[in-house]
Amino acid sequence: QVQLAESGGGSVQAGDSLRLSCAASGLTFSMYTMGWFRQAPGKERELVAAIGWSGGMPYYSDSVKGRFTISRDNAKNTVYLQMNSLKPEDTAVYSCAARLTSSITYKYWGQGTQVTVSS
């Protein structure tokens, strides 16, 4: 079965960096667009970044543009989210998700990893 396993979350100070990883198994990774979502308590889930199989023209939400970088290694079936200049408002559970490139719906989801940024 398909599994998406996130790692790399933690507690940091404002201004610090973290790199999240999401290892995928059970799917043909190159056929999927990968996204990173986050959800803070009391807020709606937000797509913060997404990347297609080729890695070109990634998407970023306005809230993270210029600070976060999404990348993928198709040989390792892994997608990354490099988060720099973290702010307290970045505190959330971060989840990776996968959708077929031809679809608009994310079909597979990871369990999520907590990121906490203190001021």
Image (tube, helix red, strand yellow):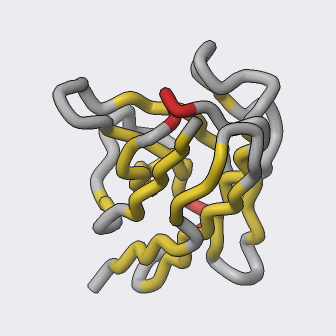
Q: Residue at x 54, y 44 (%)?
A: 117
Left-right relation of 46 to 44: right
Q: Is residue 102 above or below residue 3?
A: above
Q: Residue at x 43, y 51 (%)?
A: 94
| Residue 92 in picture, x, y percent from top left | 39, 43
Q: Is residue 21 above or below residue 55?
A: below
Task: Tell which residue pokes out farthest to the top in this image.
Answer: 62
In this view of the protein, which residue sits in the foreground, 18 or 3? 18
| Residue 38 in picture, x, y percent from top left | 40, 40
Q: Is residue 51 above or below residue 81?
A: above
Left-right relation of 36 to 40: right
State whether residue 97 appears in this view. Answer: no
Left-right relation of 48 to 114: right
Quadrant assignment, res 110: bottom left
Q: Is residue 50 above or below residue 78?
A: above
- Callout count: 0
Quadrant assignment, res 30: bottom right
| Residue 50 in picture, x, y percent from top left | 59, 39
In this view of the protein, which residue sits in the foreground, 3 or 30? 3
